[in-house]
Amino acid sequence: MTTSPYRGFKEKLCTFAKGQAGIRNPFVIVAVDPALEHRTADRLGAWATGNDEPPVIDGDITVQPIWLDELLPRTKVYNLCVALGSETSPKRLEGTMQDRLAEELVREMMQNRIDEEHLAQQSHVVLLLNLGSLYPFTRASELLDELDRRNVGSTIGIPFPGDDVGGKLSFFGGDSRHYYPAHQIPGPVQEEHLQR
């Protein structure tokens, strides 16, 4: 495997998609310098559609980017919070979002984004992009736990905006955590890793 966390992330996704077993499900996560999150997501989105960026995606593997910032306004909890607006406290709105957002995002993915046949196929890679847009309402661990609870068998990849602190990930300077059950690529992805 390469020393670039960006390349290593894509290679590990392909390895899982070819059938390697994960801790529970085939989940892969890599820290990304938050300033580079959108650029990294754009590059991964282009890779998913078959540009010539290595590694080349084998014909048996499909890769689907899901843009979390576009999915967020499609959730009922988001629309409820927007509708309530100034009628309730910001703390209460934040609590409502934190309680329900991960569940609703995964439900939306399963019902309207990922084809039913792909939900059980490890050879189908789902990239959850622009995770930072969900801060502080939900975390990668909550999304992964919800995907695991619903028995999604697709390979899941998350570029995580934050720092790799001794093998634990820190989301926007918050507490450092291990993101079980995800396989973590040592990082973070920096500017030099995105150079062609």
Image: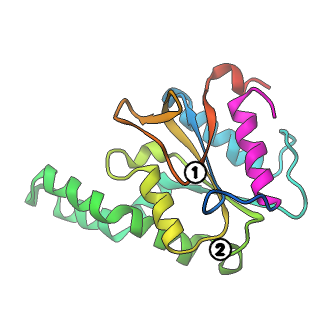
Is residue 33 rendered to the left or right of residue 84? right
Residue shown at 22%/53% (left/top)?
Answer: 94
Tag 1 secondary structure: loop
Q: Is residue 165 above or below residue 17?
A: above
In the rendering, at what x and y percent does residue 34 appear? Answer: 49, 30
Q: What residue range appears in magenta?
A: 1-18
In the rendering, at what x and y percent does residue 84 appear? Answer: 17, 63
Query: Which sits in the foreground, 185 or 110?
Result: 185
Q: Is 12 contained in the magenta span? A: yes
Label drawn at residue 182? 1
Q: Earlier in the sequence, mark 2 or mark 1?
A: 2
Main SS class of the magenta portion in the image: helix
Quarter of the picture holding the C terminus: top right
Which dot, 2 or 1, sits closer to the camera? Answer: 1
In the rendering, at what x and y percent does residue 182 appear? Answer: 58, 51
Residue holding disc 2: 119
Q: Which kind of residue does numbered mark 1 sit on? A: Ala
Residue 49 visible in the snapshot: no
Q: Tell me if mark 1 has few (under 14), some (14-19) or many (20+) residues whose alpha carbon lies within 10 angstroms of its own.
A: many
Q: Is 79 contained in the magenta span? A: no
Residue shown at 68%/75% (left/top)?
Answer: 120
